[in-house]
Image: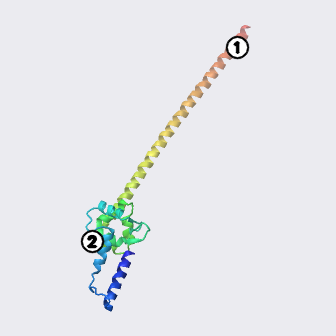
Amino acid sequence: MKKVFMTLGLASLLMLGACGSKKTDANVDSTATEEVVLEEVAPKNITSAVELKDSLAAKGLEIDNEGNIVNKEGTVVMSFKEAAKAYGEYYKETMEGYGKSFTDAVKNAGEGFADELQTAGVNVKDAAGDAVNNAKEKAGEAVDAAKEKAGEAVSNAKDKAGEAVDNAKDKASQEVNKAADKAKDAANNALNKALGR
């Protein structure tokens, strides 16, 4: 939004110069306007992702889900494309630091943008590789967790089966003892009757 106002302001100045109201340099470089916007976001000579993140935070800016740099109201101050080109690898790292997907933002930026970034020295292919590696790592963690749960389930089942066997043995032993006691009592009763007692 600020870039639009700066561009409109620049156009107004040029129109004033053309009308003779005010003299201006007619050969204003468009990169000068971009550098003003760039400096409002973070210095062009950023040397690390941490420095970029700190600069954004100090100016009350953040990165939205599309990778744009926005102010607290959500107004885009610098588009993802501009920021990715301006800050390169540092922007990629900063986005990841904010928990945003650089790979998704590159895909959403349209066809050919990945090649533009690659030409500018931003390793986009690593971003895709990182996403694949992260997915593999998460899948591996899920498999490990499933194996652990399955192992626990098997262990619990063995414990319960062991308890059931022990309970069955105890119950059978009690029943055998009861039957033996009844047989003994019956034999004693029969003997006592036979002896007349």
Residue 197 vertical position relative to residue 38 in the rendered view, above or below: above
* Dot placed on the residue nearer the N-terminal end, 2 or 1: 2
* Position of 146 relative to 77 (above/below): above
The spot of residue 139 in percent (x, y) is 41, 55
- Amino acid of disc 1: Asn
Image quarter where the C terminus lies is top right
- Pointer 1: what residue? 189
Q: Are marks 2 and 1 in contact (CB under 8 Å)?
A: no
Residue 26: horizontal and vertical position, in percent? 27, 86
What's the mark number on residue 159? Answer: none
Give the SS element for disc 2: loop
For the point 29% across and 74% down, the residue is 35
The spot of residue 102 in percent (x, y) is: 36, 65
Estimate how packed mark 2 is, as few (under 14), some (14 to 19) or many (20 or more) residues with alpha carbons within 10 Å.
some
Q: Is residue 129 visible?
A: no
Indicate the amino acid at tag 2: Ala
Would you place residue 53 above or below residue 167 in this image? below
Q: Quadrant of the N terminus?
A: bottom left
Residue 120 is labelled as: 2
Q: Name the secondary structure under disc 1.
A: helix
Gap between marks 2 and 1 measured at Cα: 106 Å
Task: Tell me where residue 164 sits by quadrant.
Answer: top right
